[in-house]
Amino acid sequence: MHKLPRKPKPPSKLPAKPKAKRVAKPPPRFAVPATPTGRPSSYRPEFAEQAAKLCTLGATDIELADFFKVERTTIWRWSQVHAEFCNALKVGKDAADERVQRSLFAKAIGYTHDAVKVLQHDGAPVIVPYREHVAPDTTAAIFWLKNRRPKEWRDKQDQDLGTAPNPIVVLLQQMRARALPVVLVVDGPATEIEDET
């Protein structure tokens, strides 16, 4: 028997339900794969000690990358994957920061150090040791105090607006006190106009 083709269904009067879209979850922003993929890492355990020494001398992440001949993002990745490398970076950078802090403090208060001068006497060099005093540096002292005691030393001081008068209002009051009275003259005697403010 021969089947007749089916008639298409008439369109329904109800609006079609929109299909629910499946939204894929984005991958974590800084995820490190559980199983290594791609080429093997060039990291070696002795890098941690080298990085600590370089950071103690003040090396930045870019300088570390240059030293290890890798990209800066690789230094970041190593610090995420290898705990000993991350700790080495922190310890080295903390030591460098402490040296800078001590130097800034010494410069702010002044210091004395041993020095030598090389002079010439009868054509022969003469080394003369002496003690040199470096005077306190005002800029270093201000920088130190602004960071250590910001409430007392920052440039902009907070004022309690409830008790402090508004300087603009005070200025306007002083100007009004000094001003001549406004006088209106209309066919007859002059009359003073009162200020309604």
Image (cartoon, rainbow, N blue to C red):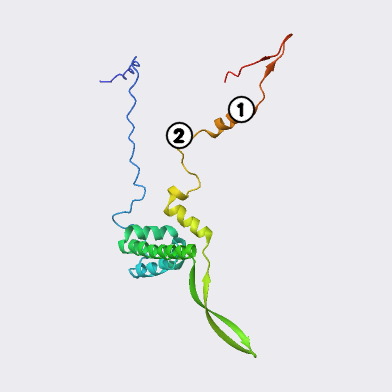
Q: Element type at marker 2?
A: loop
Nearer the observer: mark 2 or 1; the answer is 1
Type of amino acid at the residue the image marks with label 2? Thr
The spot of residue 28 in percent (x, y) is 34, 47
Which is nearer the eye, 185 or 138?
Answer: 185
The spot of residue 26 in percent (x, y) is 35, 43
Q: Element type at marker 1?
A: helix
Counting residues from the start of the chain, the first of labels 2 and 1 encountered is 2
Type of amino acid at the residue the image marks with label 1? Ala
Which residue is most to the front? Answer: 189
The spot of residue 32 in percent (x, y) is 33, 54
Q: Residue at x 34, y 70 (%)?
A: 46
Find disc 2 in the rendering and name its residue: 163
Visible residue check, residue 140? yes
Left or right, 32 with reference to 136: left
Left or right, 110 with reference to 8: right
Find disc 1 in the rendering and name its residue: 177
Which is nearer the eye, 120 or 109?
Answer: 109
The spot of residue 33 in percent (x, y) is 31, 54
Visible residue check, residue 40? no
Q: Give the quarter of the figure containing the N terminus.
A: top left
